[in-house]
Image (cartoon, rainbow, N blue to C red):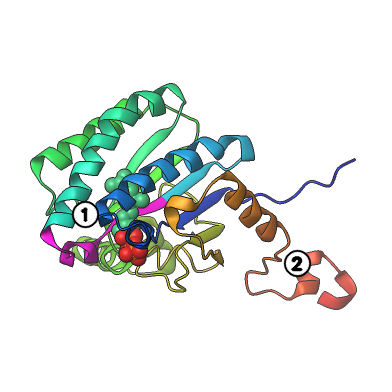
Amino acid sequence: MAEQLSVPRHIAIVMDGNGRWASKRYMPRIAGHKQGVDALKRIVSACPSRNIEILTVFAFSSENWSRPVEEVSALMDILAMALSREVPKLKRDGVRLRFVGAREGLSERTKAGLEQAEAATADNSGLSLNVCFNYGGRWDIASAAARLATAGTPITEASLSSALSMAFCADPDLLIRTGNEMRLSNFLLWQSAYSELYFSDLLWPDFDEAALDAVLLAYASRERRFGKTSDQVSGNSAATT
Ligand code: FPP
């Protein structure tokens, strides 16, 4: 019988390298972001057949507001366009779309787009797709702590965890960053405590199903110990005593 490879239930991705992909082709950065949407579509379609249940992507960080105003505005337009084109298909494919991040600071048009997309897919029970938009890990932790403090709730690991914006789902098993950069950039700081990290030197628009499969193969060979010893994890009782 073929050996069952361990599959991450939840994958999180920092989709980095759109700008460099475009610059290498003497194209405007925005062209890279547009190709980035195509890469995202490929990976969303690939997840169910690989038994991945939750996909969380970093689409716009709290820090991305400091990019040139034309790029910020183009990213907002790309989001609006992607939603109007893709939500009907996501709905048909059973994908449940959620946006994670601060709504304050977004235009009324953007907020309405996010709300409509979430409502349209709210009854779906297939792949959970979380798009982190106007999101930062520090924002998430600080706002959760502030809410608990206002409510007079003691701040513990459990209470803070359940006040975070991703409390509705399990933590990521695997966090991938493309674009040959090795940092988290304020993404899922709390939730990635025990995630396996994988850094790919592919630029995000070049990331495809084969690249995903290569990462999944690497993940299957990792041993997740969650602070325990290797013997404890493998159930070698002689060594755990
Ligand atoms: C990082 O690449 C990418 C982003 C800041 C935007 C990610 C957005 C997409 C993949 C498109 C999907 C977006 C929406 C809104 C659904 P970078 O621009 O930092 O690339 P660089 O490091 O090469 O400059």
Judge the density around disc 1: few (<14), some (14-19), many (≥20) Cα neighbours within 10 Å: some
Q: Secondary structure at mark 1?
A: loop
**Horizontal and vertical percent for residue 106?**
13, 49
Judged left or right of residue 176, residue 150 is left
Some atom of ligand 1 lies within 8 Å of the CB belonging to the residue at label 1 = no
- In the picture as drawn, the residue positioned furthest to the front comes out as 26
Which residue lies at the image location 90% right of the left edge and 74% below the top edge?
Answer: 238
Mark 2 vs mark 1, CA separation in Å: 38 Å
Which residue lies at the image location 39% right of the left edge and 69% below the top edge?
Answer: 156
- The residue beneath circle 2 is 233
Position above or below: 59 against 38: below
Q: What residue span does the magenta drawing correspond to?
A: 57-69
- The residue beneath circle 1 is 102
Q: If you read the primary sequence from the N terminus, does the residue marked by circle 2 or circle 1 appear first?
A: 1
Q: Give the amino acid at mark 1.
A: Ala
**Horizontal and vertical percent for residue 149?**
23, 67
Instruction: Tally the marks.
Output: 2
